[in-house]
């Protein structure tokens, strides 16, 4: 069954579900800057809009546009900035 998640006073929302390859979420972020923590490796794909991302160990933000994917290592934190409503898909491995 689906599970809904809400973070940052409702500015980030997602729906969790199972795929043939494992857990995944589809979500949206409102304009803002966020910091997330991971407990597994995360494959994040921008579905609509764009994200500026600061990955662990990096000193420069990188912009990811629609259908681009970035990978976040497990047990780390990363930062995301969005300038408008942005949709994403995340696979957990």
Image (spheres, rainbow, N blue to C red):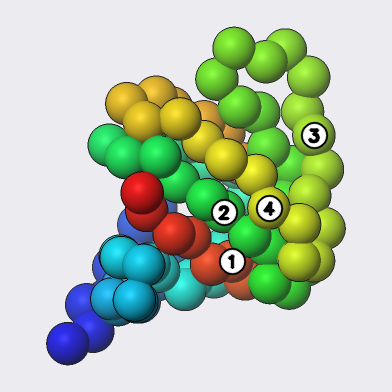
Q: Quadrant of residue 38?
A: top left
Foreground: 28 or 8? Answer: 28
Label 4: element kind: strand
Disc 3: which residue: 62
Badge 1 vs badge 2, beta-carbon distance below 8 Å:
yes
Q: Earlier in the sequence, mark 4 or mark 1?
A: 4
Q: How far from the left and from the top, in percent, is residue 14? A: 40, 71
Q: CA distance from mark 2 to mark 3?
A: 13 Å
**Which element is circle 2 on?**
strand
Q: Which residue is label 4 attached to?
A: 69
Q: Marks 4 and 1, how far apart in space?
A: 10 Å
Total labels drawn: 4
The residue depicted at 23 percent of the width and 84 percent of the height is 2
Question: Residue at position x 55%, y 20% from top?
Answer: 56
Quarter occupied by residue 37: top left
Q: Give yes or no for contact between labels 4 and 2 (Cβ–Cβ under 8 Å).
A: yes
Q: Residue at x 82, y 58 (%)?
A: 65
Q: Which residue is mark 1?
A: 88
Q: CA distance from mark 1 to mark 3?
A: 16 Å
Are the residues flagged by discs 4 and 3 in contact, CB closer than 8 Å?
no
Residue 15: x and y, percent?
35, 77
Q: Are marks 2 and 3 in contact (CB under 8 Å)?
A: no
**Which mark is in front, 1 or 2?**
2
Tag on residue 44? Answer: 2
């Amino acid at each position: 069954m689906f599970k809904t998640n809400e973070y940052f006073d409702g500015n980030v929302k997602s729906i969790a579900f199972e795929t043939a390859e494992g857990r995944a979420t589809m979500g949206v972020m409102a304009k803002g800057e966020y910091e997330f923590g991971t407990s597994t490796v995360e494959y994040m794909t921008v579905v609509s809009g764009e994200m500026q991302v600061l990955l662990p160990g990096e000193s420069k933000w990188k912009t990811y546009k629609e259908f681009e994917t970035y990978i976040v290592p497990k047990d780390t934190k990363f930062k995301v900035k969005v300038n408008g409503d942005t949709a994403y898909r995340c696979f957990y491995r």
